[in-house]
Image (cartoon, helix red, strand yellow):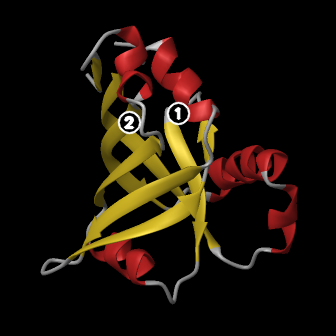
Amino acid sequence: MEIDKRIISFIKKHHVLTLATFDGSMIYCSNVFYAYDIENNAFIFYSDDKTKHFGDMKKNKNIAASIVLETKIIGKIQGLQLNGIATQPTDEIQKRCNKIYIKRFPYALINKADLWMFELTFAKYTNNMLGFGKKIIWEKS
């Protein structure tokens, strides 16, 4: 099943993803700038190998994430809850991912961190502008 275009539109309007990682004993949240790879239905982000979430993803590739529109207006609430797999792309995929990321964040050229992909397996998009509590669910088949 192809991911709903409304979910992709929401993803493209934002640039910060809150990751939730798990090291086997503790859940940890961190925020990363992302670019979206529509071809692979994956988020691309950089992470320094000294960060907690980097270490967590090396131990456990199953992660969760969210993107939210901050608003106090109930009728405008929008948010995306995600599950997927974190991987460090192979060399050939990494070149393409770098291009996608650098196009969105040109200053990342000076970045010395490692590239990661967050390949989606599940997405739940809430958008009250479509109706109170309206949810759009996508799952990888």
Q: Seen from this angle, which residue lies furthest bottom? A: 50
At a point 33% along the width and 26% down the height, the residue shown is 126
Q: Where is residue 94 in the image (x, y as percent from the top left)?
A: 66, 54
Per the image, the residue denoted by label 2 is 80
Q: Which of the pair 131/9 is nearer the observer?
A: 131
**For this view, does 94 lie left or right of residue 20?**
right
Q: Position of residue 56 (x, y in %)?
A: 32, 76
Per the image, the residue denoted by label 1 is 40
Residue 132 occupies quadrant: top left
**For this view, does 103 lie left or right of residue 62?**
right
Q: Distance between the residues labelled 2 and 1?
A: 18 Å
At a point 83% along the width and 45% down the height, the residue shown is 103
Q: Where is residue 28 in the image (x, y as percent from the top left)?
A: 29, 73
Q: Nearer the viewer, mark 2 or mark 1?
A: 2
Amino acid at dot 1: Asn
In which quadrant will I find the N terminus? top left
Q: Residue 16 carries which label?
A: none
In which quadrant will I find the C terminus? top left
**For this view, does 140 lie left or right of residue 19?**
left
First of labels 2, 1 by sequence position = 1
Indicate the secondary structure of the residue bearing disc 2.
Answer: strand
Q: Which of the pair 37/123 is nearer the observer?
A: 123
Check the image and report above or below for 18 versus 96: below
Q: Seen from this angle, which residue lies furthest left? A: 25
